[in-house]
Image: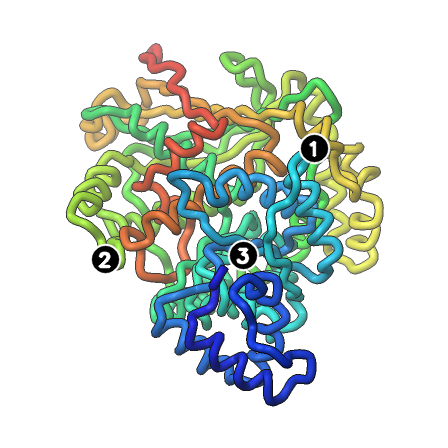
Amino acid sequence: MGYLPACLWAECESRLTRKIGFLTEPISASSRFSNTQRLLDEFTSIIPLKSLQKSMAENDSKIFDVIILGASGFTGKYVVREALKFLNVPNSPLKSLALAGRSPSRLSEALNWAASPHLPPKIPLLTADTSDPSSLTRLAAQAKIVLNCVGPFRLYGHPVVEACVESGCDYLDISGEPDFMERMEALYHEKAVEKRSLVISACGFDSIPAEIGLMFHSKQWAEPSCPNSVDAYLSLESDKEIVGNFGTYESAVLGVANADTLMELRRSRPKRARPAILGPGPAKGSIIEHQKHLGLWALKLPSADSVVVRRTLSTLTENPHGLPGVNETPEHHKKREAFWSSVKPAHFGVKLGTKSLLGLFPVIMLGIFIGLLSKTSQGRWLLLKFPAFFSCGSFKKKGPSEDQVASATFKMWFVGHGYSDSSLASQGSKKVDTEVITRVMGPEIGYLTTPIILVQCALILLNDRENLPKGGVFTPGIVFGPTDLQERLQENGISFDFISKKALSA
């Protein structure tokens, strides 16, 4: 297969022949693929890693386009299944793929499951552990992009980001944890710019549907109209029991437990620019709302989506034309500026919707339990030991069955209120007179929609890297907004629909 530059193979073979007993003959081209990981483990201990990285940079070559870390986990194996659809197929930039995790046997099982009913392709299985920095450094040195599926990210994500930034490879994850995302930005943004490493969290259901959905919604406010506020109503639907990802549950417990550290982090950082939103500030409203037009009872949520959207709008305020690409074409430059000129900022919030008021009861009870118990170690132990009890069955350690995953769908309704003419807001009017409704809709959120989004983001990086920022730690919206991500998602089962626009009665 010839993944390694020829000069590195020669140096590796020469040194290993002298120093390692098992290697007594030169390595043939046909056997290079199967021996890749064994040789890498050996020669990175012989050849200084910096020398390896320098040689690879000089040859402008990474071994793998994408490495999926945590590929044998609950979500990871679905990401593998999605990635295999685009591996070595016409018009796909994904030509080489590797899977990484702690257990080669579990990785092999995940690959077999993901490839079923077909035979699994010959994909390298790499050993890496988030508690072993050297294994992560080796991993990042081999990859153009690392897709990190190992959560909770506040516990396991930091060393992976560090390894990717130091090696100059791009990093995407499916985190929905504001503390982790903002901390990585504080620690690694400048270094990532220097090393030409793009670090982008929340590249799954958290928070692409919210970000790209809000941008799609914004385009429906044609001049001279403008939005003031947009609320996203999330409805999860299935004809079977809906069971969430335990990792999401664990992240929520730890997020509430460490809310004070996030506030300390924010106080320690410079104030971000605030977007200029026409009209009054966001209305507080009630915690529970009956959205009659949508047929939903809705509960206001402290959502990672809201945080990510605000960060994107802050970056856009600081960079009104978006972020220039590292070697951007004139066509993309023009497209980027036109795209961001059509995006109008608005106050944004997320609410969970159900068809009956009773359907909100388990969510309310879970919020109460997490709020009361997450502040102590004993309370957290109880919450994490018995998730099904505290969530009324909504979260289970074993996760959902394949039938439950296949039957689930989501709808995210974006209900925006604003002005038919922006001059009304600038004249001091507090009464909005226009409503716009759009919708994002797709399959089950954690195991189907999330892998679709993550893989499409990776394909965009592979296909269009020169038109994207040189490096840095960013939210997904500010990077992928001007790309063809929305069109790609629509082609893969996630729809963006305009529903209605109407004048509101005085």
Residue 401 to residue 323: above or below = above
State the residue at coordinates (82%, 54%). Answer: 381
Which residue is tagged 3? 67
Read off the residue under disc 2.
327
Give the x, y percent position of residue 88.
47, 44
Compare marks 3 and 2 and give the one earlier in the sequence. 3
* Viewer-nearest of discs 1 and 3: 3
Residue 160, above or below 493: below
Q: Amino acid at mark 3?
A: Ile
Q: How many marks?
A: 3
Q: Is residue 118 left or right of residue 468?
A: right
Residue holding disc 1: 363
Crowd around label 1: few <14 · some 14–19 · many ≥20 (10 Å):
some
- Helix, strand or loop at mark 1: helix
CA gap, disc 1 and disc 2: 47 Å
Task: Indicate which label's residue lies in the foreground, 3 or 2.
Answer: 3
Q: Residue at x 26, y 59 (%)?
A: 326
Q: CA distance from mark 1 to mark 3?
A: 36 Å
Decide: is 293 above or below 439.
above
Rendered image: mark on residue 129: none
Say whether marks 1 and 3 touch (CB < 8 Å). no
Tell me residue 41's x, y (percent): 61, 74
| Residue for point 32% across, 18% down | 434
Of badges 1 and 2, the one in the foreground is 2
Q: Earlier in the sequence, mark 1 or mark 3?
A: 3
Where disc 3 sits, the SS reads: strand
Q: Residue furthest top?
A: 505
